[in-house]
Amino acid sequence: MVAAATGRTITMSEWVKGFLPMAAVLVASVPWLVYKVYPPEVKHSREVPVWAVGELQQMGPVTAREWQMGALSGVTVLVWVFGGAVLEPTTVALIAIALMLLLGIVSWDDVTGNRMGWSTLVLLATLVALADGMNKVGFVAWLARAAAQALSVTAHTTAVLPVLLAAGLAVPGMPIRPFVMLACYSLGMMGVITPYATGPAPVYYATGYISRRAFWSLGLFFGLFFLAVLLGIGAPYLLTLYP
């Protein structure tokens, strides 16, 4: 979507380099913040390590199927990172799933029985198709022209990516690459806001360990914290990196 809207491609190395300072702050602070804001009910237990050892012994050694799963996952990640010029990421994922089925790592019933996964796929696919359709009929360009005059530093948190990219291109003097990367990073960081913000969010919510009220209140707290890191650290750093 970025390449189609701006003509600029963000490589994996640029993505990592641009997010590195923000990642360092988040990795260092989020676990501590979670422990303080939402502490576990049980903080110490001598029985847990003993129980874990017993469970591992019952599972036995790593099976051939598990080794295949690990190897296939590693190859998939490597192709995602280094094979973008040859295969689309979606194609890589589909090939990996097909190989899992052919090798017997998972069964077709395992795939079809994952109701949460299918729900996420349908919802995200619908949103992507809707955004693409709105762009093709000219709605995105029309809304971008109307919103460009009122664009602010927080607009990317409330607008969909195609509209935001088109609006950013319409602003004279806009540093395109920092702007695009901030918009993309915000989409990745918003997953903490609601139980269905991104693909992993429903997985955490479905475990049942976090109540609905706690999920939303924690989403508000960490959403604001992530936004502060994005604008306070990411924006100045990217403007220095890509003046």
Image (tube, rainbow, N blue to C red):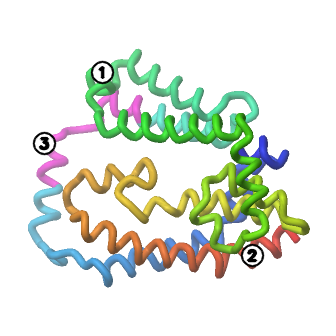
Tell me how far mark 3 sits from mark 2, CA to CA. 50 Å
Q: Earlier in the sequence, mark 3 or mark 2?
A: 3
Q: Which mark is residue 58?
A: 3
Residue at point 67%, 59% (across, down): 16
For the record, the magenta segment spans 53-69
Residue at point 17%, 56% (across, down): 52
Tell me how far mark 2 sits from mark 1, CA to CA. 46 Å
Determine contact: label 2, label 1, CB under 8 Å.
no
Q: Judge whether residue 114 is colored magenta.
A: no
Image quadrant where one finds the N terminus: top right
> Horizontal and vertical percent for residue 135?
70, 40
Tell me how far mark 1 sits from mark 3, CA to CA. 23 Å
Secondary structure of the residue carrying numbered label 3: helix
Residue 9 placement, left or right of 122: right
> Horizontal and vertical percent for residue 120?
40, 40
Determine contact: label 3, label 2, CB under 8 Å.
no
Helix, strand or loop for the magenta stretch, by majority: helix
Residue carrying label 1 = 107
Residue at point 64%, 34% (across, down): 133
Question: Residue type at mark 1?
Answer: Ser
Q: Nearer the viewer, residue 133 or 28?
A: 133
> Horizontal and vertical percent for residue 180?
74, 59
Residue 64 placement, left or right of 222: left
Residue carrying label 2 = 237
Question: Residue type at mark 2?
Answer: Tyr
Q: Earlier in the sequence, mark 2 or mark 1?
A: 1
